[in-house]
Image (spheres, grey):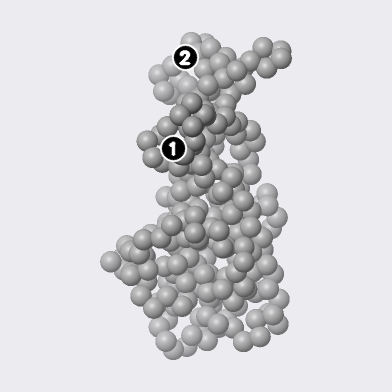
Amino acid sequence: MELLLIHYFDPVWRRIKLRMLDWSLKNLPDFIEKISLKPSAISPEERVQLEEYLRCEVVFTVMQLCEDLAIAFETYKYSTADAVRAFRAERKASQFMSKVNSRTKEELADWLSIPPVENLNRHPTAVRSLTQVKEFLGRLRKFYFDYLEMYNCYKHGNRLAYISSPEDDETPYPVVLYFPKGEERNTASLRSIGDIGPVFELGNQIIEISSYSKKNWLTRKRVGTSGNFAIEFPILRGHTQNSSRETETSVA
């Protein structure tokens, strides 16, 4: 079972779907041809609906990554005594997400599979990294609960419809129609995704930060209980740039 944990949350595989969707949105005429349609054969309404469908798939993929993050953090964290048991445990992502922005620096370091550090606040790299991770988790929590209702409709039966309505100038405007759980029979919700760039960024940062947790866990397993080893802290170079790595040496 530990072999699965070694290969779980591989960043290459996790990025494939995001990259396919990114390419499809940036090269929509080519994408339309690849799905055996001619760009001239679909109406403007169908085109905007297709774009909205692809944007929604980005959102749902990142929602799945949010759920993956909860598993990765709880499995690879330093204080986990049995990683296999933690991996197999059932947990609700919504409960995990509801508390992520209230974690201490020490708890965040634990999630990154970093051993306890004496006087943590005296380590500038650690403080900078964990401050950014906390800010990232705040954005992640907001995103997750913003889209949770629609995601549940997608996850449980794909109960969504992609439609368009004309704006004042008759330009088709895409929306997603879904039926929230517990609402009246004839009550539906409408939503338009809009700018998908920040969602791509969030997805890539989930993959990057989860990779740190797994990498630190693997490093500790290789070294064992003796000697020094390098632990890595994620440093985010702004929301529009990828993470970079900074290391510190710690005694196991």
Q: Could you tell me if the residues under marks 1 and 2 are in contact, i.e. CB atoms within 8 Å?
A: no
Residue 25 visible here: no
Residue type at the position of mark 1: Tyr
In the drawing, does residue 192 fall left or right of residue 34?
right
**Spot occupied by residue 74 in the image (x, y as percentages of width and height):** 45, 67
**In front of the other: 210 or 182:** 182
Instruction: State which quadrant residue 244 falls in.
Output: bottom right
Under tag 2, what secondary structure?
loop
**Spot occupied by residue 139 in the image (x, y as percentages of width and height):** 64, 53
Q: Which residue is mark 2?
A: 38
**In front of the other: 33 or 93:** 93
Residue 209 visible here: yes
**In front of the other: 139 or 32:** 139
The furthest residue to the bottom:
226
Instruction: Name which residue lies at 55% across and 58% down.
Output: 98
Instruction: State which quadrant residue 33 falls in.
Output: top left
Quadrant location of the N terminus in the rendered image: bottom left
Q: Is residue 138 above or below residue 248?
A: above
Instruction: Name which residue lies at 37% across and 71% down.
Output: 83
Disc ID at residue 154: 1
Instruction: Name which residue lies at 66% across and 60% down.
Output: 135
**In front of the other: 89 or 2:** 89
Earlier in the chain: of badge 1 and badge 2, it is 2
**Spot occupied by residue 150 in the image (x, y as percentages of width and height):** 51, 38
Q: Is residue 195 above or below residue 112?
A: above
